[in-house]
Image (cartoon, grey):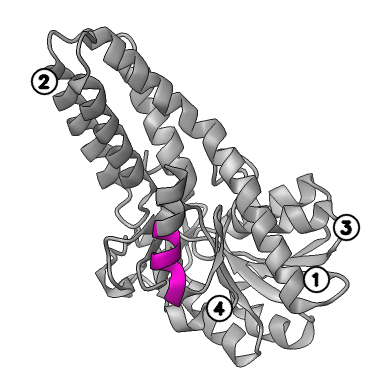
Amino acid sequence: MRNMVRGAPAIGVVGSLSLAVELIPLTFSSFDDLKAFMQKKLDYLVSARPTAVNMADCRSKLMKRTDELIAKSGVTVEEVKAALVSMMEGFLPLDVETNKKMCKFGADHILENVKDEKVIILTHCNTGSLATAGYGTALGVVRSLHGRGLLEHCFCTETRPYNQGARLTAYELVHDNIPSTLICDDMASVAMKLQGVSAVAVGADRVVANGDSANKIGTYQLSIVAKYHNIPFYIVAPSTSIDLNLATGDDIVIEERPHNELTCINGKRIAAKGIGVWNPAFDVAPAELITGGIVTEFGVFKPSELKEKLTAALKASS
């Protein structure tokens, strides 16, 4: 899973679907055996990507549903298994629906606050259909603006060292005929200064209770530069990417990736042999730099109000 699936929402959806595929042909002699199987497999899936919280969110929901189903009188093991498979299959259309709702909120908020006739968005990494079940998070906001005829341009970073922006976001932008330009990561500050950027919108692998947000490496510096240029900085993340159990970004485990992503290109070494390498895959944008807001399927929240308002929204929707 580490090598085949990327994008926090996609990890949760695809991880759950992979478990459904494995679960369908199996037969269990007891509820305890089924529950133990679910717990073991879900724990393994969560361990594959420690920074992203979406798979852990799916684990929590599936194990809670397992306990609820088992507690029902007269239900069989096979019926519980079938209900769990159905729930896992439902994560995919739900993610698409969530993305579209969330991105409408994000587009509305940007247009209301920027007050330009058309807007220019700078984004980072890949947060579109290739990182989700469909449509996207931050790139979904770009799609929403473009669909209304209110996007002037989108700048996407190459997102070194793995180049998700150059390989994936650029592909999605071209595929959808969205006016766009690819820039190197180290061009972002001058793009904000000279290219009329209206807002910066990025996704998140985990947002914690105080609003600190972990995302692809390079996000932290974008939030600093956006603040300097007085450009609103948005995190676009579904509630499944929000972890209210962690107080601050200091509590987030940051995954580190292989050294050869920095030292080699297409298998050819470009760095001096013997040089040390530090390759964190993510960094944390602090809440105080998220000046536009945190965009969710329940609305756009200031980091300071995220925990209270999201908790209320989740309670009302349950």
Mark 3: few/some/many CA within 10 Å (<14, 14-19, 20+): few
Q: Quadrant of the N terminus?
A: top left
Q: Nearer the viewer, residue 70 or 102?
A: 70
Disc 4 to disc 3, C-alpha distance: 26 Å
Residue highlighted by disc 2: 32
* Numbered label attached to residue 149: 3
Q: Quadrant of the C terminus?
A: top left
Mark 4: few/some/many CA within 10 Å (<14, 14-19, 20+): many
Residue highlighted by disc 1: 119
| In this rendering, the label closer to the viewer, 2 or 4 | 2
Residue at 45%, 72% in the rendered image: 305
Q: Amino acid at mark 4?
A: Leu
* Numbered label attached to residue 92: none
Disc 4 to disc 1, C-alpha distance: 18 Å
Residue 141: x and y in percent read 68, 57
Residue 166: x and y in percent read 64, 58
Residues at marks 2 and 4 touching, judged by CB atoms closer than 8 Å: no
Q: Is residue 130 left or right of residue 215?
A: right
Q: Amino acid at mark 1?
A: Val
Disc 3 to disc 2, C-alpha distance: 55 Å
Q: Is residue 100 left or right of residue 133?
A: right
| In this rendering, the label closer to the viewer, 4 or 1 | 1
Q: Earlier in the sequence, mark 2 or mark 4?
A: 2
Disc 2 to disc 4, C-alpha distance: 48 Å
